[in-house]
Amino acid sequence: MRERIRDIGLRLMAPLGVGLVLGLIGPFGTYYELLVIPRIGYWLAVVSLNWALADTGIRRVDGLASAHLPVPHLSVPLLGALLVSIPATGVVVLANGLSGIGWPASVGGIYWKVLVLLAAISLPAYAWAAQHEDAAAKRSFMDKSAAPQVQGRASATDAPAIGPPLFLARLRGPLPGRLLCLEMQDHYLVVHTTGGTEMILCRMEDAARELEGHGRRVHRSWWVAEDAVEAATRNGQRWFLRLVDGRTVPVGRSFQPALRDAGWL
């Protein structure tokens, strides 16, 4: 509960901070049209509402198409901004009318300004969410690494190695035990097995392609073997997979539809 409150606080700080800065700067002519207090209130309202709209659009695009888009850290937030640009324009029109700036003679005349605002909101918002998600994944990994390993099916380290020869050739030697999951750390992959871990220089995309049929990509930083999943758990809007060794792996939003279709969630 405390962590959820902290996350909500962090989410609110971003739009409030951006709104305060824009209220002090007064872009798009608002510096001359509104006094400082009404101007700050105007930008806090506009940024907060459009931030919520942009977040909704980004989540929609991220969940449906991020796996198929080039340069997702740019294309996902920009397409999300475009998706909500019309209702966001309505927010600005309403704010202009209620604040005393005046109802615009042509809505199309302010549409491009709204697109610029949405792009300015969406790009850092998506980057922050991705960074926060990756940090949560690393915290989960560190917590599980520090805790005593759960004994059970995963304790059988003499289980036969699995995986296509191309991927196995990347390892220093035979795979010790069962392959559980892969964790991306910068340009490296940490290969987690029931017999230990090994770090290799490999892209997650290449490893996932070479291991096709043995598991699935569940997060931008995680791949999980199909026979390593013990259960799926949910905490609010976030999903996690519990593996047979007790490890908890986060599920990325964009991977949830495919995992649901596969019966993992």
Image (tube, grey):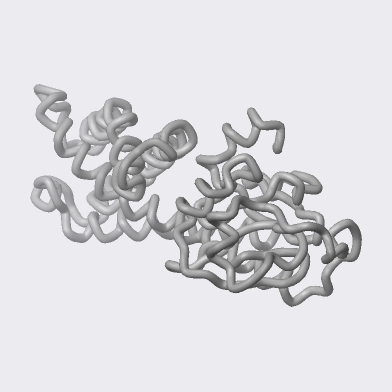
Q: How many marks?
A: 0
Name which residue lies at 65% across and 32% down. Answer: 260
Name which residue lies at 74% across and 61% down. Answer: 247
The answer to whether residue 165 is left or right of residue 185 is right
Q: Position of residue 221 (x, y in %)?
A: 53, 57
State whether residue 46 appears in this view: no
Considering every residue shown, the one lying at the far bottom of the view is: 146
Q: Is residue 86 above or below residue 52?
A: above
The answer to whether residue 103 is left or right of residue 66 is left
Give the camera-side residue of 79 and 203.
203
Q: Position of residue 240 (x, y in %)?
A: 68, 50
The answer to whether residue 96 is left or right of residue 48 is left
Q: Quadrant of residue 222?
A: bottom right
Name which residue lies at 32% across and 27% down. Answer: 87
Give the camera-side residue of 185 and 43.
185
Q: Position of residue 242 (x, y in %)?
A: 76, 53
Q: Where does the N terminus fall, quadrant-wise?
A: bottom right
Name which residue lies at 25% across and 45% down. Answer: 119
State whether residue 35 appears in this view: yes
Q: Where does the C terminus fall, quadrant-wise?
A: top right
Q: Position of residue 191 (x, y in %)?
A: 62, 65
Give the camera-side residue of 169 and 240.
169
The answer to whether residue 157 is left or right of residue 94 is right
